[in-house]
Image: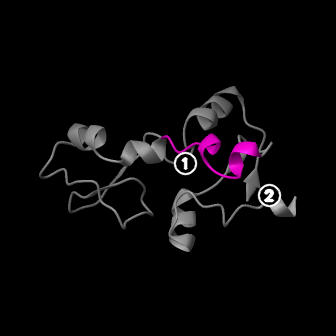
Amino acid sequence: MRYVAPGYYEYYLKKQFNPCMIGSVTISCDGSVYACRVMRKNDYGNIYITPLDVILTSSGISEYWQLNKDSLEPCKTCHLRYSCDDCRALESSLTGDPVGVYICGRETL
């Protein structure tokens, strides 16, 4: 786990959104839209069938964008939460739970 002292912009970003996923999507060569290039289990639509703006406003992708540290247990009480760079995709692939904290290094600090 990596901990860095965030600047003002990073602090604000991490306080409001998931720093890894905010505003990003992955579009595969077949047109499938994913929340992350690693999280390929759930596609949220296909740009060859549905316009991208419709997919972004009507799918669950924004839920991943808004998955900030204040919405995760035990992150919301951790004093390092806004300097922590975690990976929800890795967490999801290890535990099947994108809001889990299996890979948290807090116990070793």
Q: Decide which of tag 1 and tag 2 comes sooner along the chain.
A: 1
Q: Which mark is residue 60?
A: none
Compared across the picture, whether 29 is left or right of 76 comes to: left
Q: Secondary structure at mark 2?
A: helix
Horizontally, is 74 left or right of 55 in the view?
Answer: right
User: Circle 2 sits on which residue?
Assistant: 106
Q: Residues within 10 Å of mark 1 (few under 14, many from 20)?
A: some
Residue that label 1 marks: 20
Residue 74 on the magenta span: yes
Which residue lies at the image location 56% right of the left edge and 57% below the top edge?
Answer: 99
For the magenta stretch, what is the residue range?
Answer: 66-77
In this orientation, which residue lies closer to the viewer: 99 or 54?
99
Location of the C terminus (image quadrant): bottom right
Determine whether, in the image, residue 63 is placed left or right of residue 33. right
Point out the residue furthest to the top here.
Answer: 8
Protein image colouring: one colour
Quarter holding the N terminus?
A: bottom right
- Label 1 or label 2, whichever lies nearer to me, is 2
Asked if residue 12 is positioned above or below residue 24 in the image, the reply reads above
Image quadrant assignment for residue 29: bottom left
Residue at 36% in and 67% down:
41
